[in-house]
Amino acid sequence: MESLHITLEQSEIPTHWYNVVADLPTPPLPPLGADGRPVSPEQMGAIFPAAIIEQEMSSERWIPIPEPVREIYRMWRPSPLIRARRLEEALATPARIYYKYEGV
């Protein structure tokens, strides 16, 4: 029987995040401020670091994971992915669906 739990080895830790925006038929609407108007990257800078804003505004398919973040991924136990077979069956989908278990 196929294992339902997947844990990555350190050598398998990803080097890039996947950005779904690159594969959407139309780009998502911009984030809105309290006044209901689109928020500029400069306004977002009041609460987010520049690297996060750059990722949020990017339409690139693959975004490199910064090395300091990858170092932290290597230090901590990677969260296992668990296959959601019952959900796959309920949806009658041929796709494999996984979720991350973040418990301790």
Image (tube, rainbow, N blue to C red):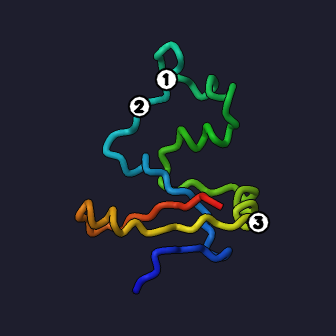
Residue type at mark 2 is Leu
Q: Does 52 sit above or below residue 104?
A: above
Q: State the CA–CA distance, disc 1 to disc 2.
A: 9 Å
Q: Residue furthest bottom?
A: 1
- Pointer 2: what residue? 29
Position of residue 2 measured from the top left corner of the image (x, y, whole percent): 42, 83
Residue pointed to by mark 1: 32
Badge 3 marks a residue whose secondary structure is helix
> Tag 1's secondary structure?
loop
Q: Are marks 1 and 2 in contact (CB under 8 Å)?
A: yes
> How far apart are labels 2 and 3 at the CA level?
36 Å
- How crowded is the residue under tag 3: few (<14 C-alpha within 10 Å), some, or many (20+)? few
Q: Upstream in the sequence, badge 2 or badge 3? A: 2
Image coordinates for residue 4, horizontal then vertical, percent: 46, 75
Q: Which residue in the structure is indicated by mark 3?
A: 75
Q: CA distance from mark 1 to mark 3?
A: 36 Å
Screen quadrant of the N terminus: bottom left
Write down the quadrant of residue 52 in the picture.
top right
Three-letter amino acid code of the residue under disc 3: Met
Badge 2 element: loop
